[in-house]
Amino acid sequence: MLHEYREEISKLKVENARFAKIFEKHNELDQKILDVEEGREHMDQFTLEGLKKEKLALKDEAFTMIQAYIKGQA
């Protein structure tokens, strides 16, 4: 997720518990979605789409937090 911000992500995961939780949940959802798409786990399409939307919302929230962090550094 947002690999171009690795440095900021590393710092935020340590400094901001909310960000760390968002990052962890995003990664959990990413793995679950991958498991379904590769056939290791079964799930109906509606549930899968819900997980994808939740993952995207977490990514958007994390991105907003990263941008705020960068802005605060300037």
Image (cartoon, helix red, strand yellow):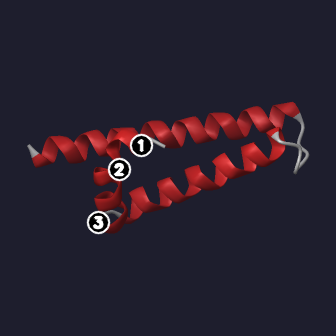
Q: Quadrant of residue 11?
A: bottom left
Q: Kindly report the distance in space between the C-alpha atoms of the residues bearing marks 2 and 3.
A: 14 Å
Q: Which amino acid type is marked by label 1?
A: His
Instruction: Give coordinates of residue 38: x percent, y percent.
Output: 83, 42
Report which residue position mark 3 lands on: 15
User: Would you call the spot at circle 2 few (<14 residues within 10 Å), some (14-19), or many (20 or more)?
Assistant: few
Q: Kindly report the distance in space between the C-alpha atoms of the residues bearing marks 1 and 3.
A: 18 Å
**Nearer the viewer's eye, disc 1 or disc 3?**
1
> Which disc, if any, is residue 6?
2
Report which residue position mark 1 lands on: 3
Q: Kindly report the distance in space between the C-alpha atoms of the residues bearing marks 2 and 1.
A: 5 Å
> Which disc, if any, is residue 41?
none
Instruction: Give coordinates of residue 50: x percent, y percent.
Output: 72, 36
User: Would you call the spot at circle 3 few (<14 residues within 10 Å), some (14-19), or many (20 or more)?
Assistant: few
Task: Judge by depth and name the residue closer to the eye, 42 or 16.
Answer: 42
Answer with left or right where residue 68 lies relative to residue 55. left
Q: Which amino acid type is marked by label 2?
A: Arg
Q: Which residue is located at x 49 percent, y 43 percent?
A: 1
What is the secondary structure assignment of the residue under circle 1?
helix
Answer with left or right where residue 5 lies relative to residue 34. left
- Whether pointer 2 and pointer 1 mark residues with C-beta atoms closer than 8 Å, the reply is yes
- Whether pointer 2 and pointer 3 mark residues with C-beta atoms closer than 8 Å, the reply is no
Q: Which residue is located at x 27 percent, y 39 percent?
A: 67
Nearer-N-terminus badge (2/3): 2
What is the secondary structure assignment of the residue under circle 3?
helix
